[in-house]
Amino acid sequence: MTTVTLRRSALTLALCFCASAAAQETAPVAATGTLTLEVKPFNSEKPLPKKVDKQLRNGGLEWGVKDGQVVFTLVGKQFLDFPINHMTRYGQSESLALPAGDYRVTGVGLEMTTSFSAQKALEKGAFFNENVASFRIEPGKTTTLSINPVIYKDATFAVNFWMPTLMASVRSDAGNSEETALNKRSPSSIAWPNYHGPLKFVAK
């Protein structure tokens, strides 16, 4: 190979490298905003046993976010096919960057029942509240999802089982939303045995 040919090959490679680098520099970057999860301190409208009150005040929420969906769960994460990789304690907050876009919030609730196995407890007491809240992440802006864990004075519980109602609301530049319960069973709730969506782990 002649010296001229070598120089031409080197020049061609250099031009290709520069073109590739320029393309990478001009490639669009996905716009992101910030989600702040604000979990308020636990509170109760009715007197609680001191031990129960202390345990609840030291509690927190397990949750995860993926593909435009945020899931809060009171069911063990091993029973869900969704990345539950955040735990935020009552009275604390957590922020993370998310791609801009619309997000839906789902709560997986659990009512205590008399059962002799985890599977029976799920079948009797677990349920899904799908898309009970929603919010939008705007590029460069912060959206706050606020959770207020409260035991209302008219709430009734099984012996030694106390679970606050998780009231969720959204704050953003667009305004504030009304509170909605994430873990309260309602006519629109889907009982565990009747749920056939993607959130429930099913062994194959």
Image: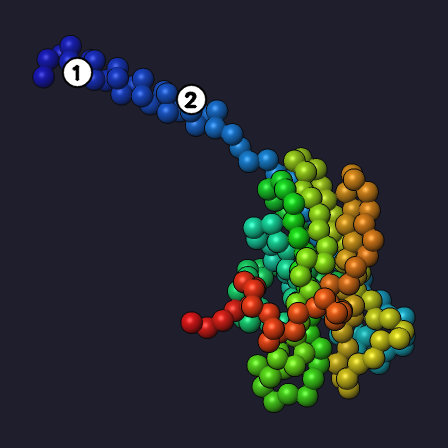
Q: CA distance from mark 1 to mark 2?
A: 24 Å
> Residue 95: image x %, image y %?
67, 48
Indicate which label's residue lies in the foreground, 1 or 2.
2
Q: Is residue 33 above or below residue 85?
A: above
Residue 89 numbered tag: none
Q: Quadrant of the C terminus?
A: bottom left
> Measuring 31% from the left and 21% from the top, which residue is drawn there?
16
Viewer-closest of 99 and 202 = 202
- Residue, disc 2: 22
Label 2: which secondary element: helix
Task: Answer whether residue 51 is visible to the viewer in this image.
Answer: no
Q: Residues within 10 Å of mark 2 (few under 14, many from 20)?
A: few
> Please, what is the three-letter code of the amino acid marked with disc 2?
Ala
> Please, what is the three-letter code of the amino acid marked with disc 1?
Leu
CB contact under 8 Å: marks 1 and 2: no
Residue 6 numbered tag: 1
> Residue 128: image x %, image y %?
66, 67
User: Which of pointers 1 and 2 lies earlier in the amino acid sequence?
Assistant: 1
**Residue 113 image-quadrant placement:** bottom right
Q: Residues within 10 Å of mark 1 (few under 14, many from 20)?
A: few
Q: Is residue 168 above or below residue 20?
A: below
Question: Is 33 positioned to the left or the right of 92 in the image?
Answer: left
Q: Quadrant of the N terminus?
A: top left
Task: Answer whether residue 156 is visible to the viewer in this image.
Answer: yes
> Measuring 80% from the left and 81% from the top, which residue is drawn there?
157
Q: Is residue 46 above or below residue 179?
A: below
Question: Is 174 positioned to the left or the right of 102 in the image?
Answer: right
Label 1: which secondary element: helix
> Measuring 61% from the left and 73% from the top, which residue is drawn there?
194
> Measuring 90% from the left and 73% from the top, which residue is drawn there?
153
> Residue 151: image x %, image y %?
83, 71
Q: How is the image coloured?
A: rainbow
